[in-house]
Image (cartoon, rainbow, N blue to C red):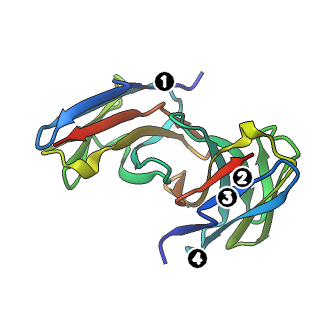
Amino acid sequence: DTEVTQTPKHLVMGMTNKKSLKCEQHMGHRAMYWYKQKAKKPPELMFVYSYEKLSINESVPSRFSPECPNSSLLNLHLHALQPEDSALYLCASSIYRDNNYEQYFGPGTRLTVT
Amino acid sequence: KNQVEQSPQSLIILEGKNCTLQCNYTVSPFSNLRWYKQDTGRGPVSLTIMTFSENTKSNGRYTATLDADTKQSSLHITASQLSDSASYICVVSISNDYKLSFGAGTTVTVRA
């Protein structure tokens, strides 16, 4: 298995809803990432987990709550989002090779906040 | 400041023609450079990866070049197809760093 999977593909939620995004990989990668990408912009790093511990939080608002239950799974819990949070949310995992974290991206979840 | 600049911002080409995309970077210490293809609403897919010592890498009709001295890279698409319509993103890595430096991307539109 050489891919990162994400569910759901699309999500529409109201500002008072609570929802979760899910990411899974079975490549044995020990670092996993969440990115946010607005239209026609590059991905922006949100969180990095390394060996199931939060390693980087890029000053993301608390309405986004990441969770890494095990080395293969990464969740992003969403609560009280704003319309400007509508974006493509990308998950990635990486293998450490040649002094580098080689990242593999999932297909993304298209989130719309109404 | 680590920066990656891509040009042009967008381009339109006719099916079957070739095109070249440019990437200039100031990222240091440089580890490797990747070109990704991203279809609208989908995740980026890696096309090529080059380290400091490599100056060319091919993947089918895609050929990337790297000049580490001038800190420039290019992606050449040969005999373009309609399916090549996408955003192409240049991404530079720093050694032992989780964070990547992304270019803003070049949007390529291939017309019949």
- Identify the secondary structure beneath mark 3: strand
Instruction: Kindly indicate whether the residues beneath marks 3 and 1 are on one polypeptide chain.
Output: no
Residue A62, x across and y down, in percent: 88, 45
Kind of residue at disc 4: His
Disc 4 chain ID: A
Is circle 1 on the same chain as circle 4?
Answer: no
**Contact flag, marks 1 and 4 (Cβ < 8 Å):** no
Q: Are marks 4 and 2 in contact (CB under 8 Å)?
A: no
**Horizontal and vertical percent position of residue B39:** 41, 49
The three-letter amino acid code for the residue at tag 3 is Leu
What's under tag 2, amino acid-wise? Val
Residue at point 29%, 31% (across, down): B21
| Mark-to-mark CA distance, 1 and 4 | 34 Å
Please tell me which of labels 2 and 3 falls first in the chain. 3
The lab-note entry on whether marks 4 and 3 share a chain reads yes
- Which residue is disc 1 drawn over? B26
C-alpha gap between disc 2 and disc 3: 22 Å
Say the numbered circle drawn on residue A11. 3
Q: Residues within 10 Å of mark 4 (few under 14, many from 20)?
A: some
Check disc 2 and report the residue beneath it.
Answer: A48
Per the image, label 2 sits on a secondary structure element best described as strand
In depth, the one of B46 and B37 nearer the eye is B37
Q: Residues within 10 Å of mark 3 (few under 14, many from 20)?
A: some
Mark number, residue A26: 4
Quarter of the rendering occupied by the C terminus of chain A: top right
* Marked residue chain, label 3: A
Q: Could you say which quadrant of the image residue B89 lies in?
A: top left
Depicted A28 relative to depicted B63: above or below: below
